[in-house]
Amino acid sequence: MNETVQPETVDADRAVLDHFESTIAHDQRIEPRDWMPEKYRKTMIRQIAQHAHSEIIGMQPEGNWITRAPSLRRKAILLAKVQDEAGHGMYLYSAAETLGIDRGEMTEMLISGRQKYSSIFNYPTPSYADVGVIGWLVDGAAICNQVPLCRSSFGPYARAMVRICKEESFHQRQGYELLMTMMRGTDTQREMVQESVNRWWWPSLMMFGPPDEQSPNTEQSMAWKIKRHTNDELRQRYVDMSVPQAEALGVTFPDPELRWNAATGHYDYGQIDWDDFNRVVSGDGPCNAERIEHRRSAHEDGAWVREAAIAYADKQAARTKTAA
Ligand SMILES: [Fe+2]
Ligand SMILES: [Fe+2]
């Protein structure tokens, strides 16, 4: 905009901004056709792409066990779960595309490290109990994070989240059911479950992101209603929900400071190792390189499918044109 701008342009700009702000203030949805500040658009692209990438990369740790599931029933359950995660990734890429970016671009940004995914998927899955613990704790933490996003101010994201959350809660229950079965089994199976819980508990707490005082974008995101609760609020809710579930299961969390606090009405918990978190986020986790390498080769192996689909669509379009 320059000095000679016409008064009616300023009024028009103010009118669209007012419309955006009043839509948010009235808890209504911003839709792709609506005007939105560039920073809102960029923030939404980053948030949705990061979520989509997490669903897709998140297929790998559990996918690791599909060929070695202990029974046909467990294999069918695991296949369906991993396939659900692919579906979540697809909805979310579609939601991001309404903001003017395409999924090819997002995949490139993921592979080149310019967009992130949840660090939780950079940990290995050496035991079958990990399949149950991921369902229970990782999908459980995802639900805590995502249920409030069903009320995100951006319409396509909020609507995708409704269906995704229903499927995530099913994942959580199937994970818990697997663990219940193992806990009713042999001592070795019970030890497998406890050993897996010991590895996943702290990383699952890190899924809520850095402490509030170190989360610079929280304030703006809450003002835009693309975030409804702070990281620490959601983390506390998750701890409060998980402790009774662990008791019912017969496992313990590896935190000697974890105890009920009658004064606050919440469980207190120990100090999270944020150095470890930062190390994994910045690319030095146990499986970062492997996850991206796998994604890159899958994308390259799929190039012929994308080319064939485009060639077919072109042929169809030419045929429709000729017929018309
Ligand atoms: Fe998912
Ligand atoms: Fe899930």
Image: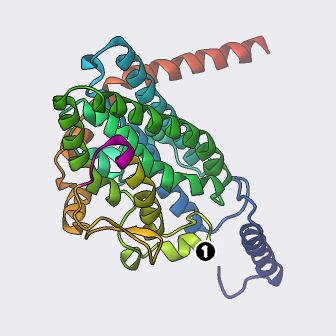
Residue at image location 75% in from the left, 61% down from the top: 28
Residue at image location 17% in from the left, 55% down from the top: 284
Q: Is residue 118 visible?
A: yes
Q: Position of residue 32 (x, y in %)?
A: 68, 52
Q: Is residue 111 left or right of residue 280?
A: right
Specify the segment rendered in magenta: 246-253
Q: Is residue 308 left or right of residue 199?
A: right
The amino acid on which the numbered mark 1 sits, given as a three-letter code, is: Ala
Q: Is residue 8 magenta?
A: no
Q: Residues within 10 Å of mark 1 (few under 14, many from 20)?
A: few
Which picture quadrant has residue 15? bottom right
Residue on which disc 1 sits: 223
Q: Is residue 113 visible?
A: no
Circle count: 1
Indicate whether 204 appears above or below 136: below
The N terminus appears in which quarter of the rendering? bottom right
